[in-house]
């Protein structure tokens, strides 16, 4: 960032107070800060040797408390900043909650919560800083396995600071942190409680998510010793469903996001849920506290589902490999318009809540046989194509506003002779488009990406193409080239991202030959075999000069072999099972029709972030970093945490945050300051370090190598993963991801298109 810009903004901040907030948001977290991010301190237990060294100075009246932290003795599973950012709370396997002064690296308060198992969530409401430091009346929540309830009056609700803690037992406790006593105990859950959520507008209300499939609501103003069931997922998804995480929208406290087992993330309107519950109570017998009922579906608008479009189709394959999909963490962006999900067993996904988009299940309905029909967006209106769900509005390629698309030029003018589609590099303008021209600096970026592609550096090529796409979002060639890189890399979800890029390229340029062909290959790789054959036929119809190329023949043979390899039993199993996108081997009769309808109406993701591994723990977090959510951070099973640019999805930094696994990452509310924890009994604090300080000790220099290793780990056999977590080194892991051999290079006819 230029110095002149910073100087001008500093002057504006001094002159106009209204500019202070925008200045803070803009410079809260910047790229230079991310490059200098390093370890500031470790909050941990004092070693016996250091404790012995501290005896003599302490006897002389020298205070070593800022350096002697005496922290946790078990894994640190949760972290929570207060609103001002001058206090940090942590919860651990040792059943203790500690309140830290992170700026002075001091422990202010340590308390045994009375739990019988690990603490998984800590939450606070009220002015924690003033209450703790000045000794005001405070409170906290925790859980135990005893079926007992304790409620003590601690003054008016407005004067009470409440801290909520959930653990691996089934209890939720509320504690007074000043006198270290329990003032509320709730034991309504029947399985482990995993997360607590609070709302700024409702300081006396909070929610819990547990592995019994229930979302419960608590109101500390009521005299009742019981909580109320807000959402019962078992009524919709069967008895095996588990709720893992939840969060409340900071800008709309009536919006609740819930993550559970399976690939779907649920968004609920609390007001509509309450109204529905009241109507159910009027018709339900006394004593029933749940609104869920199969005969009374949720009203329209009360719930909305989100899912990465390729995951429902991948479920059978994942289940066969004992690979579990579960949302381990959900959080909203500071402005409440985006939802970030860390999907266990997969990647990190960002969903845009304002510009929603349906999953890209299929591009070309069977009636499209000419470029003119593509331009006019002609399609069937029945909403179905070969069993693939097309939503009521159908799939329609976005049309340019203000001008019509130019017709496709004669094929002979833009293509090489038949058979050479994939064996030569066409000129940079082989796919004509009104947006083909790139500024010189973007042309250089594109050439760098092409060179990385030629060197088989797929991730580097993807990142360079993504940089160019961010600055030239209407250039079809960039999307087509990035799709080719995705298809070569073949990490989890890459073929679906390639399909999305092919769709975008075709929408910008209906005559994009390579995008059409890559689309057919993506459909085949995504197991849409019949649709891949249809798309290939459509490609041959649009580009007859390429109908007999070696690439088309090879893809046609693959599709034909896949079609014939399906047994009659599999076909009968698939018949009548509903849209392909939602079929899975684990579907049970207990899944209600209402649930199927909500899943069918789900929305797709906007961005996907790759590189980390999330298969070992079910509490791994991913968070926005920066007041404007400029970056995304996530922990990983390899002991590192990853930082991505939000808009480009490019990986910019990897730091070693734990000796085993990083689970928790909580950014400071207003500074470039990050707290992390994991399996180590340590809370680590990170901020930008001076230029004179050596940062190499914690920096993972080979980011691409670390990302590839994590992809292999995610696709490894569960026994091999267990051995890896025990410290064994295993080479040559069989993987369908980064470590897999490039099948498309095994034969001449299957080589993918080079970038344009």
Image: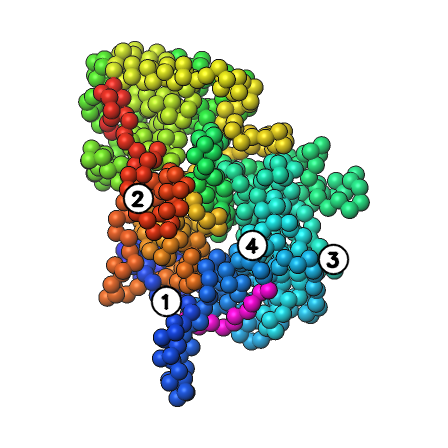
Q: Which residue is mark 3?
A: 224
Q: Is 598 positioned to the left or the right of 420 in the image?
A: right
Left/right of residue 101 with respect to residue 233 in the rendered view? left
Give residue 559's position: percent from left, percent from top. 37, 17
Neighbour tally class for label 1: few under 14, some 14-19, many 20 plus, Cα within 10 Å = some
Mark 1–mark 4 Cα distance, whole angstroms, equals 28 Å
Whichever of labels 1 and 4 marks the residue nearer the N terminus, that label is 1
Q: CA distance from mark 3 to mark 4?
A: 24 Å
Answer yes or no: is residue 684 visible.
yes
Tell me which segment is drawn in magenta. 104-114
Closer mark to the observer between disc 2 and disc 1: 2
Q: Badge 1 is on which residue?
A: 41
Can you see residue 13? Answer: no
Dot 3: within a 10 Å radius of its alpha carbon, few (fewer than 14), some, or many (20 or more) residues? few
In the rendered picture of this protein, how many numbered marks are placed on residues? 4
User: Which one is in front in this view, the residue at disc 2 or the one at disc 3?
Assistant: 2
Report the Cα–Cα distance between label 2 and label 4.
32 Å
Query: Splitting the image into 4 quarters, where does residue 413 fall?
Result: top left
CA neighbours of label 2 inside 10 A, class few (<14), some (14 to 19), many (20+)? few
Quarter the C terminus occupies: top left
Instruction: Identify the disc placed on residue 191.
Output: none
* Residue 730 marker: 2
Say which residue label 4 marks: 168
Kindly report which numbered mark, 2 or 4, lies closer to the viewer in this rendering. 2
Quadrant in the picture for residue 418: top left
Which secondary structure type mostly characterizes the magenta part of the structure?
strand
Question: Would you place residue 323 above or below residue 124 in this image?
Answer: above
């Amino acid at each position: 960032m230029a110095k002149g810009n910073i100087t001008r903004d500093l002057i504006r901040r001094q002159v106009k107070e209204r500019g202070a907030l925008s200045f803070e948001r803009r410079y809260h977290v910047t790229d230079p800060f991310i490059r200098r991010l390093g370890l500031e301190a470790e909050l941990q237990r004092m070693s016996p040797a250091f404790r012995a060294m501290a005896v003599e100075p302490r006897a002389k009246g020298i205070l070593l408390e800022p350096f002697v932290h005496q922290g946790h003795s078990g894994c640190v599973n949760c972290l929570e900043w207060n609103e001002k950012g001058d206090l940090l709370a942590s919860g651990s396997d040792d059943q203790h909650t500690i309140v830290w002064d992170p700026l002075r690296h001091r422990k202010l308060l340590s308390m045994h919560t009375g739990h019988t198992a690990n603490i998984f969530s800590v939450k606070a409401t009220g002015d924690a800083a003033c209450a703790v430091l000045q000794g005001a009346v405070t409170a906290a929540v925790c859980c135990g396995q005893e079926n007992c309830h304790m409620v003590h009056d601690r003054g008016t609700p407005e004067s009470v600071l409440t801290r909520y803690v959930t653990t691996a037992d089934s209890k939720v406790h509320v504690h007074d942190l000043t006198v270290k006593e329990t003032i509320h105990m709730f034991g309504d859950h029947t399985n482990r409680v995993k997360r607590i959520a609070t709302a700024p507008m409702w300081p006396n209300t909070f929610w819990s998510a547990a592995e019994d499939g229930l979302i419960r609501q608590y109101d500390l103003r009521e005299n009742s010793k019981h909580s109320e069931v807000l959402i019962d997922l078992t009524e919709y998804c069967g008895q095996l469903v588990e709720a893992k995480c939840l969060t409340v929208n900071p800008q709309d406290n009536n919006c609740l996001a819930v993550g559970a087992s399976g690939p779907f993330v649920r968004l609920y309107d609390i007001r509509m849920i309450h109204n529905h519950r009241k109507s159910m109570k009027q018709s339900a017998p006394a004593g029933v506290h749940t609104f869920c009922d199969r005969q009374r579906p949720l009203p329209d608008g009360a719930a909305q589902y989100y899912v990465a479009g390729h995951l429902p189709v991948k479920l059978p394959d994942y289940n066969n490999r004992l690979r579990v999909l579960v949302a381990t963490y959900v959080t909203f962006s500071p402005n409440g318009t985006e939802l970030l999900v860390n999907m266990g067993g997969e990647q990190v996904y960002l969903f845009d809540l304002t510009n929603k988009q349906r999953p890209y299940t299929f591009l070309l309905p069977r009636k499209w046989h000419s470029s003119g029909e593509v331009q006019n967006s002609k399609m069937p209106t029945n909403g179905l194509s070969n069993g693939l769900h097309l939503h009521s509005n159908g799939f329609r390629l976005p049309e340019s506003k203000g001008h019509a698309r130019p017709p496709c030029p004669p094929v002979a003018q833009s293509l090489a002779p038949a058979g050479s589609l994939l064996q030569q590099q066409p000129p940079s303008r082989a796919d004509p488009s009104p947006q083909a021209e790139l500024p010189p600096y973007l042309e250089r970026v594109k050439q760098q990406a092409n060179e990385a592609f030629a060197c088989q550096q797929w991730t580097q090529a993807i990142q360079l193409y993504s940089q160019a796409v961010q600055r030239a979002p209407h250039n079809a060639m960039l999307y087509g080239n990035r799709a080719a890189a995705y298809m070569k890399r073949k990490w989890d979800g890459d073929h679906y991202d390639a399909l999305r890029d092919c769709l975008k390229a075709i929408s910008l340029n209906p005559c994009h030959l390579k995008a059409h062909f890559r689309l057919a290959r993506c459909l085949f790789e995504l197991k849409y075999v019949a649709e891949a054959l249809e798309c290939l036929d459509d490609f041959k119809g649009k580009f007859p000069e390429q109908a007999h190329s070696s690439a088309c023949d090879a893809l046609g043979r693959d599709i034909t072999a896949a079609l014939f390899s399906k047994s009659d039993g599999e076909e009968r199993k698939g018949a009548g099972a509903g849209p392909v996108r939602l079929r899975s081997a684990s579907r049970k009769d207990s899944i209600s029709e209402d649930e199927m309808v909500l899943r069918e109406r789900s929305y797709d993701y906007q961005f996907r972030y790759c590189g980390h591994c999330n298969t070992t723990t079910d509490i791994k977090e991913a968070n926005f970093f920066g007041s404007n959510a400029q970056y995304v951070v996530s922990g990983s099973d390899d002991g590192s945490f990853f930082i991505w640019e939000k808009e480009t999805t490019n990986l910019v930094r990897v730091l070693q945050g734990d000796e085993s696994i990083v689970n928790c990452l909580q950014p400071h509310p207003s500074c470039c300051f990050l707290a992390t924890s994991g399996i180590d009994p340590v809370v680590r604090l990170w901020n930008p370090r001076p230029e004179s300080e050596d940062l190499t000790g914690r920096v993972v220099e080979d980011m691409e190598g670390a990302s590839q290793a994590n992809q292999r780990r995610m696709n490894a056999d569960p026994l091999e993963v267990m051995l890896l977590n025990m410290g064994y080194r295993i080479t040559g892991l069989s993987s369908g991801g980064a470590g897999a051999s490039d099948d498309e290079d095994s034969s001449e006819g299957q080589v993918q298109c080079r970038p344009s």
